[in-house]
Amino acid sequence: MARLTVFLVLLLLSTELWAQWQVYIVFFRDKRHSPFSLERPQEFLSQRSIERRRRQNIPLTGRDLPVSPAYLDSIRKTGARVLYPTRWFNGAIISATEAQMTAVNRLSVVQSNTGQRLSRLEELQKGRSLLPDLPRNDRTEAIETFNYGFSDRQVSMLGVDAMHRAGFRGEGIHIAVLDCGFQGFNTALPFRSMTVLGTFNFVDGTTNVINSCTHGTRVLSVLAAFQEGSLIGTAPRAAYYLFQTENNATETRAEEAWWLVAAERADSLGVDIISTSVGYYAFDDPAQNYTISDLNGRTALITRAANAAASVGMLVVKSAGNQGNRLWGRITFPGDADSVLTVGSVNANGIYSVFSSRGPTADGRIKPDVVAIGEGTIVSLPSGTVTGDVGTSFSAPLVAGLAAGFWQANPRLTNMQVIDLIRRSGTRARNPNDSIGYGIPNFERMQLLVTSLPNQIVKSTDIVVYPNPASSEIRVAFPESLHGKPITLLLTDVSGRQYMETTITAAKEPAIVRRLTAKGFYLLQILTTEGKKVQSVIFE
């Protein structure tokens, strides 16, 4: 009895101490003491990541540099734990007690009072490890005609069957799926031919992404499954990273942080497309809830992370959410990001699903962008059983696979051009609305549209746009070959809304583009006598 009493006392003390640990994100003042250099990007980015930027004329910036290891060490000296650094936000996700957090905020390298509490730490992080090298499937045999079985309608509605017949099934495209877990991905029959490059669980810091959650498995099957006569995904020959960012036990803003660091990992690995069917607006702690006015594309941490992912050339596809017939009604974060392709739901007849979250954003932009079948979508369960399911969670990966095959067919396009063409191919492209956006996209219409694109200036050194991101103004430097020639500068958001248009004469001194609108992600179109350059820019 005495031993039991002592055990209970220790358990209560342990629980009380455990409850003091919280998860925070903190931001550093600068990166001046980072040992890394933009001239040696191979030290912190894969060659695929570097090539993705080069292919889309995206210059390396200070945002790409890892945070200073010395700054991370200064946090550790307070007793706090560094869970993950974030180079895009120049900060770190940490776990700390209130006393340790006070000490962290006093550090000279930390921006004053920027530590944001994300959640109580339910389970301390285990030792993180690098993504493992998993066996790759090098299956390359050509199959001109597939038997899609039950999944025929969800594939053919998007013209993906024609895409597959043309030989574009995602080969050479790397896709990261960010979700709650992927039970059965390594055993179920529909996944037998899937190429998995790596897995990581950002919630507990391990490579284990198999748990009781089946949502990620069902989402993945819409993309990657290959079972003739039953279920074939829209990108069955792409290669996949499976990242768990969702904590199945709680709903806190910490999950936004896990999503951020997973997106950064995807970037460094050279991922082309992020497909994510998680979304947020309400949490276990109501004090953390977002409001409709926050749906402005620049407030939520996960929204800013999604825009950052797009700024380095990745294409982010996000489900709109299932709040259409509920009190919230609107899209969920990060679906409000202007550089994210947000996907709603229709049924097999192309009619809007009442549960599908609607737009617009708080600043009046059309959302969702497009729709696909999310009502009766054919998916695979972890057991391999093929069944129907409901939710925008499944319409989003359908479109992500469409984007993969289309990008494979048109590799010189930028991520934002792919999004633009997906929108423009929609059945409501000329009259979008806040329920189905630009409508149902289609591969064959996209292929027709791509032939109308003007020639692009492909050498990133020809015209240099800097700094990017910028706070108030961006400079555009022109090569000597353009000096004395007319240049038109056009600034729009990704939906095409125009904010500035001016014609100048190129000179030795760079042109200046000043911020005339809200902070966020924009497209700067530079029209010259030799062609056109489209550069994504961020005002922050």
Image: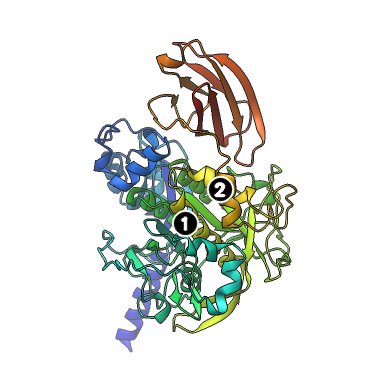
Q: Judging from the image, what secondary structure is the residue with disc 1 in?
A: helix
- The N terminus, quarter of image: bottom left
Q: Identify the residue shown where x is 30% and y is 33%.
A: 38
Is residue 89 at least partly visible in the picture?
yes
Q: Position of residue 422 (x, y in %)?
A: 59, 51
On the image, numbered disc 2 is attached to which residue?
419
Q: Identify the residue shown where x is 25% and y is 63%.
A: 133
Dot 1 surroundings within 10 Å: few (below 14), some, or many (20 or more)? Answer: many
Q: Quadrant of residue 495?
A: top right
Q: CA distance from mark 1 to mark 2?
A: 11 Å
In-front residue for pair 264/170: 170
Dot 2 surroundings within 10 Å: few (below 14), some, or many (20 or more)? Answer: many
Residue 381 to residue 38: above or below: below
Q: How is the image coloured?
A: rainbow
Residue 395 to residue 502: above or below: below
Mark 1 touches mark 2? (CB < 8 Å): no
Q: Earlier in the sequence, mark 1 or mark 2?
A: 1
Q: Identify the residue shown where x is 40% and y is 24%.
A: 462
Q: Quadrant of residue 151?
A: bottom right
Q: Position of residue 218 (x, y in %)?
A: 50, 73
Tell me, for residue 404, which label it has, or none: 1
In-front residue for pair 171/331: 171
Residue 277 to residue 501: above or below: below
Residue 143 to residue 31: above or below: below
Amino acid tagged 1: Ala
Q: Position of residue 488 (x, y in %)?
A: 58, 21
Q: Identify the residue shown where x is 43% and y is 78%.
A: 190
In-front residue for pair 128/187: 187
With 399 as the anchor, is 205 left or right in this view?
left
Q: Position of residue 472 (x, y in %)?
A: 54, 25
